Amino acid sequence: MDFMVFQYPMITVQACLDGILLGILFALIAYGMALQWGVMNIINIAQGDLVILGGYIAYFMYLYGIHPAWGVIVSPIIMYFVGVGIYKLVINKVVDRDLFISILATFGISILFMQLMNFAFGADVVLANSGYGTTFLFDSAVVLPNSKIFSAFISILFAICLVIYMKKSKLGRAIRATAQNARAAKILGVDTEKVYAATFGINAALCGVAGALISITFTIHPYMGLPYTIRSFMIVIVAGLGNLPGVALSGMGLGVFEEFADYILGTEFRIGSVFLLLVLILVYRRFKLSRKREYLK
Amino acid sequence: MKINKIILSFISAVAILLSTSVVSFAKVVGDKIVLGAAISLTGKYSSNGVHTQNGYNMAVDRINSMGGVKVGGKTYKFEIIYYDDESNPKRAAQLAERLISQDGVEFMLGPYSSGLTKAIAPVTEKYGVPMVEANGASRSLFTKGYKYLFAVLAPANLYLDVAIRTAVELNGGKGVRIAQAFEQDAFSQDVRLGILDAAKETGSEIIIDDKLPKELNDMAATLVKVKQMKPDVLVVSGHTKGALTAIRQIAEMKVDVPMLAMTHCDAAKLSKQHGKNSQYALCASQWHKTLTYKDDFFKDGMTYAADFQKEFGYDPPYQSAESSAALLVFKDAFERANSFDQKKVRDALAATNMQTFYGNIKFAPGGQNVDKPMVLFQVMCDGAGKCENKVVAPLKWASAKLIHPIPKWSER
């Protein structure tokens, strides 16, 4: 145990800001998971692997001399079609089945994606350099890499766009209707098959954005997806499905929690503490999270 | 009747084929010495697995084309049976069993990484199969009393030892304040133990001692502590991920530290991925092409590097060089044993005392190579941003002078 983080106020501020910026990025991934969970009742274990795949798209743009920040536009477009493809190939066969079947199916997809990425891109750890520099606050006592600020900003931007899209567009309304009551929506002429495919696509696109941001901020590697899946799963469990501000808040909360766990317990317990928190929350909630499809605002 | 005959002849043909193929897999057939190796061609170690395989292949071709191995007045050529262990220790152990008991291999080459070597060593030991390995440096490999395991590389605890000693020397012999962050795996933790030993001997103090989990790609918390505590040396070891993450975040957070020492810089292609941001980083390496060791097959490091570049299209990382050296050791041992008896070859291996382009090789009773020091290189960049690794320690091999302390970010 080390309480240095509380002894120096500037380190406390630094930890909070780092955590919040990180948490916003987590929240974006979790938002995609909540959307798809709410609409299709599918818990996507491959979420983190979609994120990493999105990161590789940005990385390859960087390799070919394009600034990786453009990845946040290109990567979601490609990932949307990847998502729709996965839906057509696998998910539409399990979407009306038990929750556990879908968990197994997406678990399989996750393993497949890991191995394919390893096969296609190699096992090297890679990253894309944005060259964004650094912001100094409070007389250089707090240091924030601009890439982190950029990630948080882009995440918020995409979340806002998506909320507006869900509220205003025809497809968005259809998605919400399907989430409320798929059968009723179908009777009223909503092509639910199309809605499901689009939902999965949108989720993959959000993962693509997040992946591009991660390749700029951190590092990517074919086997690094699982922690992102766990984090978003946890955020959704805490926030509930129909609760976007809740997703954002619990995302930031998780980010700050991680940073503080890192300082207090030691870096080795950082990811471990996330898992522990997940267990605690699950016990607390006692799986109250209903299995029925919920409406996502 | 006719059909029966056809079936019979078909079966016997298959049987003959099978029997000949089994025979051809045995250890020494005709003029071939068959070695076995389980290598990570897929999975998370696949890049380094390929470096290892390229190193082995390069040496096999070279030795075969330069006259092969002479045993009992006859010339033999090397051949290697490879299997892909999928970077998975269990699979590696299974494949070792298979190589030995099914394919009849009597001499083994090591896999990539300490973890996989640890998985294979009990198997080779059980069957009394001599294994020369080039990519398992973990200290725990050499404390188990294995009799048939020989490693051409220096053990992990020596990787960054020289960095601490150099820092102390530059500090006028007084102890230094060390901050360290190590991944939680066998190899990195061994590197850490080496630092602890060096710190104790030099009277240095460890003020930050972080352990990084395998999934980690964010070291910001450690680096904030470093900024606050201002250590004299920052040591990071976490394979390629640790090296890349550290450099990225040190540059982004403008962390000033007089000395930064790491492992896996060349595997991480540090200077290529990070350019000038990686400047001044000190990296532990088993080998560097500018070292002046010599042998008859590859001549010296520079020639090896050039030949390797020509054959495989990239500059050889030390993982390839040490793998090539493993074959040279085998050849030398076979010729001195003048026999293919496993026991005799093992004894000959244990008595190895030779120089290769990769370094001197002499095994301690535990099997580790005690005759080859680690080298430390520093990433140095020119004005145009082109970066190169230059050996700076130990002084005997240095091709450039160590830049110390590292200039502050505000002055770069």
Image: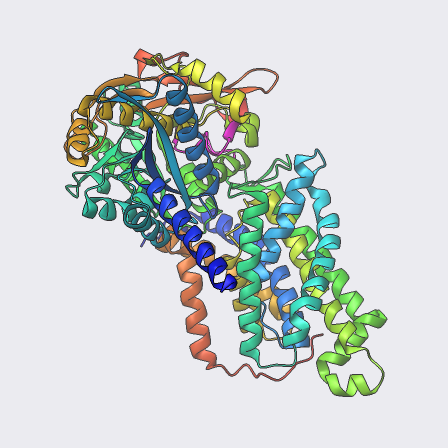
User: Hey, which quadrant is residue A98 in on the image?
Assistant: bottom right
Q: Is residue B390 visible?
A: yes
- Magenta region: which residues? B254-271
Q: Is residue B255 magenta?
A: yes
User: Hey, which quadrant is residue B338 in on the image?
Assistant: top left
Q: Is residue B285 visible?
A: no
Residue positioned 71% across, 62% down in the render? A85
Judge whether A182 appears above or below B59 on screen. Answer: below
Q: Is residue A245 magenta?
A: no
User: Hey, which quadrant is residue A215 in on the image?
Assistant: top right
Q: Quadrant of the C terminus of chain B?
A: top right
Residue A174: horizontal and vertical position, in percent? 80, 76
Closer to the camera in the image, A168 or A210: A210
Judge whether A137 appears above or below B31 on screen. Answer: below
Residue A166: horizontal and vertical position, in percent? 78, 69
Residue positioned 55% across, 36% down in the render? B252
Residue A253: horizontal and vertical position, in percent? 53, 63
Closer to the camera in the image, A111 or B227: A111
Residue B124: horizontal and vertical position, in percent? 24, 44
Q: Residue furthest front?
A: B1
In this image, A105 relative to B80: left or right? right
Judge whether B293 appears above or below B175 on screen. Answer: above
Judge whether A20 appears above or below B380 on screen. Answer: below
In this image, B305 relative to A145: left or right? left
